[in-house]
Amino acid sequence: VESSIPEGQRAAWRKHSAQGFTTKEQFEDEAVRHIETTLARSLFNCDELAAYSGTALAFRDRLVIEWNRTQQRQSFADQKRVYYLSLEFLMGRAMDNAMLNVGMKDAARAGLNELGFNMEDVISQEHDAALGNGGLGRLAACFLDSMATMNFPAWGYGLRYRYGIFKQEIVDGFQVEVPDYWLDFNPWEFPRHDVTVDIQFYGYVSRKTDENGKSVAVWEGGEIVDAVAFDVPIPGYGTPTTNNLRLWSSQASKGEFDFQKFNSGNYEGSVADQQRAETISAVLYPNENFETGKELRLKQQYFWCAASLFDIVRRFKKGKKAWSTFPENVAIQLNDTHPTLAIVELQRILVDLEGLGWDEAWNIVINTFGYTNHTVMPEALEKWSVPLMQNLLPRHLQIVYEVNARFLQMVEKKFPKDRDLLTRVSIIEETQPKMVRMAHLATIGSHKVNGVAELHSDLIRTTIFKDFVTIYGPDKFTNVTNGITPRRWLHQANPRLSELIASKLGGYDFLTDLTKLNKLETFLDDKAFKKEWQEIKYANKVRLAQYIQKTTGVSVNPKALFDIQVKRIHEYKRQQLNILGVIHRYLTIKAMSPEERKKLAPRVSIFGGKAAPGYWMAKTIIHLVCAVGEVVNKDKDVGDLLKVVYVEDYNVSKAEILTPASDISEHISTAGTEASGTSNMKFVLNGGLVIGTCDGANIEITREIGDSNIFLFGNLAEDVEDLRHAHHYGSFQLDPDLAKVFSAIKSGTFGDAGRFAALCDSITDHGDYYLVSDDFASYIQTHGLIDEAFKDQDAWLEKCITSVSRMGFFSSDRCIDQYAEEIWNAEPLPPDGGANGKANG
Ligand code: 8GP
């Protein structure tokens, strides 16, 4: 159906085309109009939430205009498109970002003032879009921002969860999970009921002969669920390019709403079917670095992959090009193994539906996909039971077996008579039940596999993918060290620092070329600059102190050293090492004379992060932190020398408050376990220093900023295996200082010791898998160095400024450049046809 306006009417159309506001006056017009008409509220009935809504809608209008133009431009240009498939997009708030990218924040601030509102209060009305668990999901959000800013024709594809990551409440020192229903009012999404895809599950496969006499597989029966598209505009900074994030929502199929049941009076039955369909996109699985293998999760994965692939293939087919050109037109990046079924689905589309030969199709598939691995931890590696997949996706399982058979044949030819090798690399694990190893499938079905920091990429080459390196050679495996968007993580989170930097560098170019920060080093002797830098840090700490006071009732001294560890709670990230170190500090202070105490720099130890609901040890760690806070914060002996705070419900918006306020942040994972980490980059970019292990991106951060500007400690990745071995077969020696900490816990200093028994025993009696005891002495000693260093504020400040100036490498723009160059072979599409497309700055 032709849906365009006929040529003769287009002039009239263009005359009435939406423009959006461009002045403060017009902003007020638009905001008030939206409040009065779209929201049906009045000046007698307008609270901050309504003011937020009106402001958001006014900015949204501006975004949508550029969004439509961008989509048109990308369709006409018809160059290679990038698709980023991720089950998680941890976007946080959208309005502040929209304001930055539209470039009218000051006008809006003044306008809101005139209307009786304060900008910051209005911004904080927005509910975070929290469709992710942690690093992996936030990385996807940073990448979307960079791809739009750099003018790549790139779409994200994900799921529109009705419930994002749960809201964390701390009740009596325990985590309680509360559902996060975030869709009450979400002006940033556009339902596209016209973009609906039928997704099939279950059923059976039969073979039929097509008109050419060829045998084809036909997948029949089972049930159909509808995937409905919801689109979210992703504006770039300093460019009109506004990309699309398409999130799929599940609905009962219109055809499937069981009219038979309905008409025979089984109304409840048909509504139940409806609800079952909606369950697929109902909730984000709240695990990070852990897989549970639940059927609903596999359903989510297929639902999203199939809808996305249908959409991508439909768009490709509009161009009427030969199938062999598919990989020249489409690059699909798999964010971890969650979208691996997309590989199988594309092969199914090409072979079963489009009639291509197996090899021709498989070639296209391999050249289309790239796979990013985010973890080496065994409990996070996805495996699906064969019977489960057989039942849910019978045709896909056949394809998996066929891919595997051909792959193993190839291996057998190259390495004859190595049965062990075949067993190790097979997609199918010969266990009871048999399992499909998704990382193997993703590796075999992609042309590039990358890790997310140098150490991590080296580790995957020598551990989980060692055999694949032997088979394919080293070139298939590469590294793209993670990055963060400086727009959100410097300019938005820390506007005053961004402004100060801009005043020195002569503008905001560093926000799109972060390496420009290196000029800051020439201002290390500029006293006024340094003073202002320090004042900004102090103001950020005051803001956090106020927030802590308001939310926890604990008052902390902003002059103290703020020591922050915020991230998902996990034994490998070692929040337990941190809190055990805090207890050690507490015991040390208690044993000090008043004179000694005077010499000690006051500390605030701040923790935040969610534990997966079923992860008891992580919940125990949270409880220990809270229990220690209860005792320490009330101890008059200690006063300001030590405070311990748990910030409830850590999320993107809280990170925007916490990150600019740190003096030290903790990135202290057992060496070799944290693939990259990205908050380490955020903290350094905001003028905080790091205490960390030689793990993930800490290593590259050290290389960039210099080892005198970071506090490294602990054992190295290469020694971890031997140490673990020694714990079991040698005699395990508990660190003597740690032993004192345990006896304090066991004597009930922090309440019922029984609650912490399993945590203590995991270290003393169960092999100390994460090497807490091995690293304890060096951790404590390094904190001593930090105390000393903090006393010389001038030297400290110099370290901070130097570090910031050397952080250019960690922009997610650099990541996207690298992916585009080395994996996607994709080019930007500048809106003005120019070289870099920074058209309307
Ligand atoms: C995380 C890594 O733990 C973190 O080091 C890294 O910075 C981040 O990914 C982005 O690359 N990994 C995960 O979140 C993860 O592996 N999640 C599992 C469910 C796959």
Image (cartoon, helix red, strand yellow):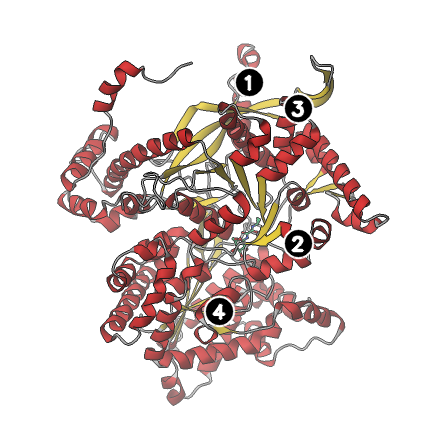
Looking at marks 4 and 2 on the same chain, the residue that comes earlier in the sequence is marked by: 2
> Which residue is under mark 1?
256
Callout 1 amino acid: Glu
Callout 3 amino acid: Asp
Q: State yes or no: Cβ of the residue under disc 3 lies below 8 Å from any atom of ligand 1.
A: no
The residue positioned 58% from the left and 51% from the top of the image is 450
In the depicted view, which residue is nearer to us: 461 or 181?
A: 461
Q: Which mark is residue 702?
A: 4
CA distance for labels 4 and 2: 26 Å
Q: Is residue 557 visible?
A: no
Q: Which mark is residue 12?
A: none
Instruction: Label 2: state its secondary structure.
Output: helix
Callout 2 amino acid: Pro
Q: Are marks 1 and 4 in contact (CB under 8 Å)?
A: no
Looking at marks 2 and 1 on the same chain, the residue that comes earlier in the sequence is marked by: 1
How crowded pointer 2 is (Cα within 10 Å; few <14, some 14-19, many 20+) is rated as few
Callout 4 amino acid: Thr
On the image, the x and y values in percent for residue 564 come to: 42, 65
Looking at marks 2 and 3 on the same chain, the residue that comes earlier in the sequence is marked by: 3
On the image, the x and y values in percent for residue 641 come to: 38, 77
CA distance for labels 2 and 1: 49 Å
Whether 766 is drawn above or below 28: the answer is below
> Which residue is under mark 3?
352
Q: Are marks 2 and 1 in contact (CB under 8 Å)?
A: no
Instruction: Label 1: state its secondary structure.
Output: loop
Disc 1 versus disc 4: nearer the observer: 4
Residue at the farthest top position: 263
On the image, the x and y values in percent for residue 205 come to: 71, 23
Looking at marks 4 and 3 on the same chain, the residue that comes earlier in the sequence is marked by: 3
